[in-house]
Image (cartoon, grey):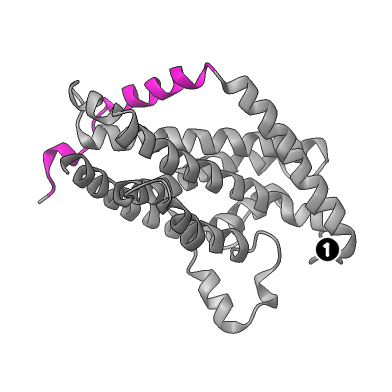
Amino acid sequence: MIRRDLIPTHRALRVWVRHLIQYRSFYLAEWAGNFGEHFLYLLAFGYGLGRLVPSLNGLSYAQFIGPGLVVSIAMWTSSYESTFGAYSRMRIQKTYEAMLSAPLSVGDIVLGDLLWCATRALIGSILMMIVLMIFGLIGSFWAVAVLPIIFLEGLMFGSLGLIAAGLAPNFSFFSFHFSVVVMPMFFFAGTFFPLKGLPPWMQAFSEMLPLTHAVRIVRGLIIYGHADSFVWHLSILAGCTIVFMMAACAAVSRRLVD
C-alpha cells in the first residue's frame, strides 16, 4: 500500500513557484550562456564536422543532428538540476527539511522538484530550437509539438537524477550516475549518427534506451512534421517516466527519514 505522504497534491506547484522565484535572479545570464553554447554546438558539429559527413537519408548532417541536440540538452539540463541541484537542497541547504515543516508532503516536494527539472529542460530546448530556426533547420510548423515531449523527457531524467540524489553519499557519486546512465544515452540514442550503422547487439541496446524514443519523436516532428510509430515511442517514454517518478519518490523519502 502506498504511503499517503508519498502521494503528491496541488501543493507541489508551490515548490515549483519557489524554484521559479529563485531562478528569476540569474536567468538572463544563464540564457545568454546557453544560447551561445547551443550556437557553438551546432556550428562545430553540424557545420564543422558535418562537412566530412555525407547526407543521411537526404538530410544534411546539421539537419540530422539538430533535433538530437534539442533532446540531449533537455536530458543534460534536467539531469544536472535533479542531481547537483537537488542534492544541495536536500543535504547542504536543508531546503527539503524546511519544506517538510510547511504543509507539504514528500510527494509534493518530489513532484515540485520534478516539474522544475522539466521546466529547466524545456527552457534549454526552446533556446536550442531558436538556434535551429536561425539556421533554417526547422522543417515543419509541427516542431512546436515537441514541447510536451521535451517536458515529459525532463520529468523522466529528473526522476533518474533524484533517484541518484537520494542514494548519493556525496557529490562525487554523480560522476558514476553521469558515466553509467547519461553518457551512454548521449552517445548511443541516435543523436549523432544513425543506429543502422551499429552492430546488431548495440542496436538492440540502443532500442532499450528511453532517449532513443525521444530522439525519434523529436527528429520526426522537427524535420517532417510527423514521427513514425509515434504512439509506441510515446508509450515507452510515459511508462519509463511513471516508473522512475515512483522510484524517485521512494529514494527521496528514504533519504529524508535517514
The residue positioned 12% from the left and 39% from the top of the image is 4
Question: Which residue does the image show at 41% across and 46% down from the upper left?
Answer: 171
Task: Identify which residue is drawn at 53% across, 77% down.
Answer: 204
Q: Is residue 139 visible?
A: no
Which residue of the protein is positioned furthest toward the left in this rendering?
1
Magenta part of the chain: 2-25
| Above or below: residue 55 compared with residue 87 | below
Quarter where residue 51 is shown: bottom right
What percent of the width, then of the height, locates residue 217?
Answer: 59, 54
Given residues 62 and 169, the one toward you in this image is 169
Q: Is residue 60 magenta?
A: no
The residue type indicated by label 1 comes to Gly
Counting other residues with Cα less than 10 Å from the Cα at mark 1, is it few (<14), some (14-19), or many (20 or more)? few
* Residue placed under numbered mark 1 in the picture: 58
Relative to residue 110, is residue 202 drawn left or right?
Answer: right
In the displayed structure, 103 sits above or below 46; it is: above
Question: Where's the C terminus, which quadrant?
Answer: top left
Q: Residue furthest right?
A: 51
**Could you tell me which residue is drawn at 49 percent across and 33 percent down?**
119
Please name whichever residue, 56 or 42, is drawn nearer the observer in this view of the structure: 42
Residue 54 appears in the rendering: yes
Position of 23 with respect to 228 (left or right) is left
Counting the numbered discs, the total is: 1
Q: Return the x and y of residue 239 as percentages of the image width and height.
A: 37, 57
Residue 112: x and y in percent read 34, 32
Q: Is residue 12 magenta?
A: yes
Of residues 9 and 45, which is closer to you in this image? Answer: 45
